[in-house]
Image (cartoon, rainbow, N blue to C red):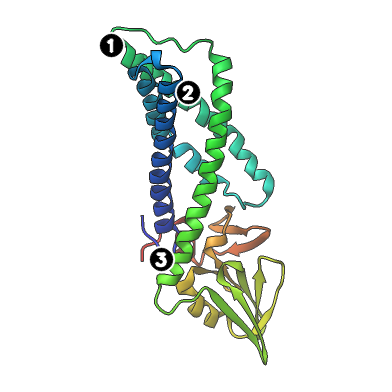
Amino acid sequence: MSGDALGTSGTLRRTFLYGFAAAGVMVAAVNTLNVITMGHEQPQLGLAGPLVWEGSSWISLVLLFWIPWIGYRLAPPFVRPRWWLLAHVPAALLFSLAHVVGFIALRKLVYWLAGDTYQFGAFLPHFFYELRKDSLGYVLFIAGFALIEHLLRQQQLIDTPGQTLTFDIRDGQRLIRVSLCDILAVTSAGNYVEFVLADGRRPMMRSPLSALEDELGSRGFVRTHRSWVVNAARMTRLEPEGSGDYTVELESLKVPLSRRYPQALARLRGTATP
């Protein structure tokens, strides 16, 4: 996977890897605490049983980490429209079901190899108990992905020579300083350009759009149309319109993506090369 200096695919790859590492360590810590707690409260269980139970749960969760990641990619926390977040309901249910089935299978295998039999008990009551815990874990994973991706994008801006986290919108003697992440898109308006900001403001600046494209192109902005430059990091959806054209959704804003800009499509899909 590759991308531009402030791009999509490289950041997403690192978001997944850092999230995977953090989740693996944190869940392992929780499982270890559970083993210690069971050893203290139920010493008759010994050490082998709790280790198998908690270890199988950890392995199953790590192997299924891709499910919340796909959920995050389909519906990040700030996606618009908000109803799209409902996609997380079946994703969390699938994650929990697969997690439970996975650790049951692992436990049965270990017990069988040891010449014993593992009994999980009545499935539905135990599953609903695990579902509550897994749903909380799923939500924490999604929140963790969002936080990691945000921090990575901010760090990329800091590490890129000559880049700042803000942009000055000038119109004569008037100046508005805004955060780059708050700029959803820029559109041409005659001899001016209009900035569409996340808070709903639309300040204008006297400048050709091509000049803004050159200035913001290295900061994660993409020219999608002769009249539009968009902030790739704020894209929430890419909808095909037929004949090679697309609609780019940036929260509540919809911007055209012309088939004449194939590099923009590649960058927004996360498949562009530097």
Residue bearing the label numbered 1: 114
Nearer to us of marks 3 and 2 is 2
User: Which residue is rendered at x = 37% and y = 27% of the image?
Assistant: 55
Residue bearing the label numbered 3: 4
Q: Amino acid at mark 1?
A: Ala
Mark 3, other Cα within 10 Å: few <14 / some 14–19 / many ≥20: some
How many callouts does the rendering have? Answer: 3
Q: Amino acid at mark 2?
A: Val
Mark 2, other Cα within 10 Å: few <14 / some 14–19 / many ≥20: many
Q: Nearer the viewer, residue 210 or 261?
A: 210
Q: Tell whether 154 sits left or right of 274.
A: right
Determine whether the residue tagged by mark 2 lies in a helix, strand or loop. helix
Distance between mark 1 and mark 2 Cα atoms: 21 Å
Determine whether the residue tagged by mark 1 lies in a helix, strand or loop. loop
Q: Tell whether 189 sits left or right of 59.
A: right
Q: Nearer the viewer, residue 219 or 260?
A: 219
Residue bearing the label numbered 2: 100
Determine whether the residue tagged by mark 3 lies in a helix, strand or loop. loop
Q: Is residue 271 visible?
A: no
Quadrant in the rendering for residue 160: bottom left
